[in-house]
Image (tube, coloured by chain):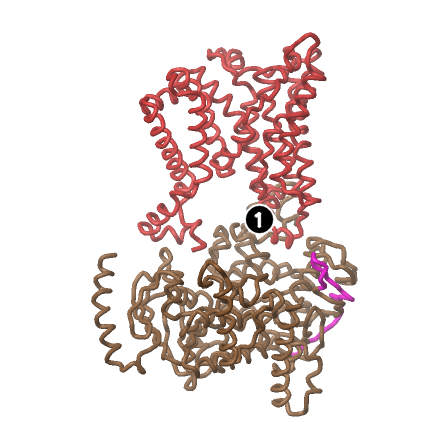
Amino acid sequence: MHLDEKTKAQGNDGTGAKSAGDGQSERVPAIRLVGIEKRFGPVYANKNIDLNVAKGSIHGIIGENGAGKSTLMSILYGFYQADDGEIYVNGKRETIPDSQKAIAIGIGMVHQHFMLVDNFSVLENVVLGVEGGSLLQKGVDKARAELKRLADEYELNIDPDALIQDLPVGLQQRVEILKALYRGADILILDEPTGVLTPAEADHLFRILGQLRDQGKTILLITHKLREIMAITDEVSVMRRGEMVGSVHTSETSVEQLAEMMVGRHVLLNVEKGPSNPTREVLSVENLTVTDKRGVDLVKDVSFKVCAGEIVGIAGVSGNGQSELMEAIAGMITARSGSITINGEVTTKADALDRRHRGMAHVPEDRHRTGLVTKFPAKENMILGYQDQKKYGEGLFLDLTAILKETQDFMVDFDVRPPDPHLKAANFSGGNQQKLVLAREMERDPDILLVGQPTRGVDIGAIEFIHKRLIEMRDAGKAILLVSVELDEIRSLSDRILVMFDGKIVGERPAGASEQELGLMMAGIDDPSEMGSDPMVSAELARDNTDEALVEMAKGGKE
Amino acid sequence: MSAQSEKLPRWVDYGLIPLLNLAAALLVSGLVVLLIGENPLEAVYWLVQGSLGYSEGIGFTLYYTTNFIFTGLAVAVAAHAGMFNIGGEGQAYVGGLGVTLACLALDHYVPWYVTFPFALIGAAVFGAAWAAIPAYLQAKRGSHIVITTIMFNFISYSLMAYLLVRVFKQPGSMQPESRTFLEGGRLPFIHDVAGWFGIEMASSPLNLSFVVALLACVFVWALIWRTRLGYAIRTFGTNQDAAVYAGMNLSRIIIITMMISGGLAGLMALNEVMGAQNRLLLDYVTGYGFVGIAVALMGRSHPVGIIMASILFGMLYQGGAELAFEMPKITRDMIISIQGLVILFAGAMEHMFRPALVRIFTSRHDDLGQEA
């Protein structure tokens, strides 16, 4: 088989070169993939993928989690080797055994999780790996000049001497882009770039991408956010279950059509829900302050209430204290001051188990890190947090039959696939893992449910299901506190929206608040109404303001 | 990818891989034996013959096995909570103090079966107490358990040496050891027990604590996989954040787990002090606590695996001694280096054959991946 591949490769090399010659350079796609296949054990991550990316375009790749987008990009960037298929870059057949090779042929990648050294400066991060000799000075000087040129050319302003840890995420991402450009990337792959950005930062990123395209760079954008695809790309390719479903011109498609291509059936993008009917107060948080080990306040003097029969959403860019607020309410970390009242009883000092006894349930933000023990089978995960309950056995011993029986029931009720209680949690797909956690917490019939990022990394079909269950629970008279970085999710589920910025709740808005308004609040601009009466003008103004604010912050970080 | 560790069928994971590791260790040992001009096959013969070939040899093998089971279980219980207890040596040593106190206090007055429960509790309590201090420091002060347990080994050496010389040593004796226990402080040997039923067995130091060791295996199995505490221990050991999320009291888990671990290590003293020697000796633990780490690694922290690994190390100890006797060019030090190789291949290089096996099994049995 290995030999076959080689001979095939040789055969194709000739034709590849020929077609490059025929195409008169302009028409040659920046990237052409032919029949790419990648298997992990018996599972196809990529099956017979063909893809053409035109030079100087922004090409979006969308698909549900596990559709194979990341695998495909990893093949392109040399992290994985394709089992079969051919890669052409600028018309030339290439094999990409590692990322060095990818960089050498002009492919750069901006990862979802930044690969930066936090306590290095921007400059040091940019030259990392391409220092150009055993003494730093020469490389650093060259990089400084190059950074200045890039800043002028692409509006990629950044203080080269600022430390990464002092920069906001939007600027950290800019450093990642600069790193790729500094290494001479002509083709830029961005993996879910807006996950950590405010809407304003995302807009700025898109402007940068637009300029890069206009300068002739090719950009591959991987995302699951349909709106971004519509806003920025020229062409879009849709993947489903490891296969390429199709490529369309963005201008000729619609959000609905793309969603349908992704899932393979018609999807309800908006949740249908009636008006809320809030009754008694279930959760009350007063003047809560949470401090981390270094003494930095992460949650600052936060107060709010959640009543039975309503969903309160907390919007905010990730890292603005929402996670810590949730953990403090759930009893995972201790608040420095303030009080938490559940069902009329002050529970500030109670631990997580105690709070569950008082009617709280908690779907944590990160199911891998917190919500599941991925090495345990589903049945053992089903009692996590409820391990002390009498129904799971009297005394010291656990009643394994009771646990098994209940897990089976829960799995059927929440349509977890496969419904095998003995399967390790790690072997379920992301959506089904999330359903396991939701089943465990929601089946307890809690008075107050804390939900963090209920649909992160969950495919569209499962999102629909999860949203429906949450609304059902609300209608059954339960209180729900929802934290999500997906503004769409907050807006479509919540009855009231609290916006968090820098550890504080900066305002409350009704369910109907516009995305623009919330986006500005998330960026820390207190009252958008002061910016002028025309919303477009005010948004534009605010955008510039935030950019300047970010640059200021970056500079401030130097001191 | 990440699921790679899940892909192999159980018999490969728990049977084939340890066997391959063992074979590799023996192969390298064989090369060493060749280098010094001896016949490796003959060496293997004497190793097996010496440990399993005759009744007395089996007795000695199982006597060593008993020690390894206790110390292996101790390491395993801590490992399930994600902690590395390398203080088994000291805990077993101090456990001997509990046994000795019980035996010295009671052997004049009562038969062994009355002394026995006190000695057992004494061993467990003293071992547990010795582990409790590092556990407390870890739980409440964040002092790393690896550092503190190894420190406590050294402290135990000094403490016990002091006690033996200043407290237990008999007047007029030059030996730093306690007085020899009377009948009431001696565990019956298995060959004696067999004699009660009319079965002839060669005499060996194998005693009733072997049965205690097997019961301890059942205890650990039930504790880890059948109880709430075991569930908490495994959750804590696998995913600490999830344990916090579930409202488990982490300090409590650390301290309780380490005390159980120390208690198990302490029980080793039953075998040595009350069973084989009938007195408290200086430095009687001689490395059993450390070999327990290898035993737990090789046995995958599962009681059944620990029994098998313990038998293997028991064979190496007993067969090795025989081998050194029969083939004088193979010295005691070489036996230790063979044991070292087994530890190296079974523990440190545990995953050496894994990637290859994963490739073989995933390409040949495509359906296995789904089943696992």
Question: Does residue B217 lie above or below A396 as drawn?
Answer: above
Which amino acid does the dot numbered 1 rest on?
Ala
Task: Tell me, yes or no, if residue B298 can be seen here.
Answer: yes
In depth, the one of A532 and A214 nearer the eye is A214
Instruction: Report which residue position mark 1 lands on.
Output: A402
Q: Residue at x 37, y 79 (%)?
A: A55
Residue A467, percent from left and from top:
57, 71
Q: Residue at x 78, y 66 (%)?
A: A286
Residue B114, quarter of picture: top right
Residues shaded magenta: A275-297
Residue B159, percent from left and from top:
68, 25
Spot the residue most to the bottom: A534
In depth, the one of B92 and B111 nearer the eye is B92
Q: Residue at x 38, y 71 (%)?
A: A106
Find out whether residue A291 is within the magenta segment.
yes
In depth, the one of B60 and B35 nearer the eye is B35
The tint chain B carries is: red
Q: Is residue B29 left or right of residue A308?
A: left
Question: Does residue A298 lie above or below B283 as drawn?
Answer: below
Q: Where, quadrant-wise, is the N terminus of chain B in this rendering?
A: bottom left
- Badge 1 sits on which subunit? A
Task: Tell me, yes or no, if residue A1 can be seen here.
Answer: no
* Letter of the chain in brown: A
Find out whether residue A58 is within the magenta segment.
no
Residue A271, quarter of picture: bottom right
Residue B35, percent from left and from top:
33, 26
* Dot 1 crowding, Cα within 10 Å, few <14, some 14–19, many 20+: few
Question: Does residue A64 lie above or below B98 as drawn?
Answer: below
